[in-house]
Image (cartoon, grey):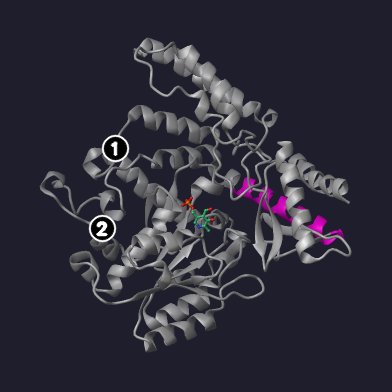
Amino acid sequence: MDSKEFRKQAHKAVDWVADYLENIEKYPVKSQVKPKDVYDQIPSSPPSAGEPFDQLMKDLDEKIMPGITHWQHPHYHAYFPANNSYPSIIAEILTAGIGAQCMVWETSPAAAELEERMMEWLKEIMELPKNWHGVIQDTASTASLVAILTARERVTDFKINEQGFSTDRLRIYCSTETHSSVEKGAKIAGIGRENVVKIPVDSAKAMIPEMLDEQIQQDIANGYLPCCVISALGTTGTLAFDPTKAIGEVCQKYNLWLHVDAAYAGSAMILPELKWLKEGLELADSFVFNPHKWLFTNFDCTAYYVKDKEVLLKTFEILPEYLKTKTRGQVNDYRDWGVQLGRRFRALKLWFVMRTFGVDQMRQVLRNHLKYGQWVAQQIDENDSFEHLTPPKLNMVVFRRLEEGLSDSELNDLNQKMLEAINASGKAFLTHTKVDGKYAIRLVLGQTYLEERHVEAVWKMVLSANLKKS
Ligand SMILES: Cc1ncc(COP(=O)(O)O)c(C=O)c1O
């Protein structure tokens, strides 16, 4: 393909994306294909001669799109969203075109310096502690792994980095509700899943700090080396909020690293009225949230903040001759701030999103989402056929349908069937969790293109799925 052909096809591709997003409501939200449907349509070998581009686009429509779940559909209410927006998409096109690999400042000074500024912009609009330093990671899982590794090195005085593991058995603490990325991080960091201690939660599914304190004391008495605590602001299952301040005080007592995982809910910190979210956050050593979830910046873009930059750098830096530069020490070489050497130019899309939306509009969209969450929570409150299974928080409700005379296990079946019926209709996509053994439907109202009419429509779907069943 030459530049003339590229110009022609790329313009068509942009039109394709605009048409796709304009017409997204015509697609079934959750892909309806069966395993191997797509695989079997793709030839077993690549073509030896190049094919016409138009044929490729035709195959995209016919073979690939049926196997896509439409995350940008306003009726995407599953898991947590991975939102895009037009400015973010444009920035991704430009990033691909520029094609820079941004491992150190000298491999693209603008990328490093824009990243530094964007992390400052986010810190300012979220009113995060001023002494934090930010870096963009690919995902929250990677950011939490970085936190675990940094905590591991701090508590062992960088011994494991240098000599590998000795006999110390390190301990990581989190609640029973914490995201699985913590266990994965413990596996990768060589600490081991068995040393991830799950602290019990209260009725709102938030970690009980007194039990954390007791567990740490017990572990010390038994010869373990407590390493870090991971607390959550917005758990995946039920959007529970661990009490950061009380947990931070326990961490201070034992000099433990506190990492706060706010992967989804962290974006809500751009709203000044939600100050409660940040109570005690200054006690954290590190903090992660995903602009790629709820801040209109398409996947992947994770913001990771750390208080003690030097410990982070000491954990990750490594300096072979071929990476030595004259500017080292005067600039941020982000390869030292995490696992990867090669890095994408992710700051560009944050810049495009924040400048195109403006902070006021970003806040307005999130406020709308919170209002939608409250409206659905109220419908559940006012309808005896439903109950909340955890207190509604921000823009997510966790609920189930009730029916007189049915046992919990029969209600589990009923609610599962209801969820499957909605998803099979293609009109919306919701997912579930279990709360104390009860099958719970999670409804998340956070998609970029969500409007009031969709909120009313999805609630009607829930009601009519129930009517069919009763
Ligand atoms: C609370 C929480 N932490 C971590 C993650 C992992 O996020 P990522 O996909 O960016 O690794 C998620 C994903 O939904 C999450 O909800």
Secondary structure of the residue carrying tag 1 is loop
Q: Residue 147, located in which quarter of the rendered image?
A: bottom left
Q: Which mark is residue 212?
A: none
Answer whether labels 2 and 1 touch (C-beta < 8 Å).
Answer: no
Depicted 203 relative to depicted 131: above or below? below
The residue range painted magenta reads 363-385
Label 1, on which residue?
101
* Quadrant of the snapshot with the N terminus: top left
Return the residue nearer the eye: 462 or 107. 462
Q: Position of residue 100 (x, y in %)?
A: 30, 34
Return the residue nearer the eye: 242 or 348. 242
Mark 1 Cβ and ligand 1 under 8 Å apart: no
Q: Is residue 90 left or right of residue 66?
A: left
Instruction: Kindly tell me whether residue 153 is visible in this rendering.
Output: yes
Judge whether residue 380 is colored magenta: yes
Q: Position of residue 155 (x, y in %)?
A: 30, 74
Mark 2 Cβ and ligand 1 under 8 Å apart: no
Q: Amino acid at mark 1?
A: Gln
Q: Position of residue 266 (x, y in %)?
A: 53, 57
Q: Is residue 300 left or right of residue 463?
A: left
Q: Residue at x 77, y 49 (%)?
A: 418
Return the residue nearer the eye: 308 or 378. 378
Mark found first going from the N terminus, 2 or 1: 1
Q: Which residue appears farthest toward the left when viewing the image?
A: 321
Depicted 357 relative to depicted 402: above or below? above
Q: Residue at x 66, y 62 (%)?
A: 434
Label 2, on which residue?
316
Depicted 214 relative to depicted 286: above or below? below
Q: Is residue 450 left or right of residue 39?
A: right
Instruction: Kindly tell me whether residue 306 is visible in this rendering.
Output: no
Magenta-highlighted stretch: main secondary structure? helix
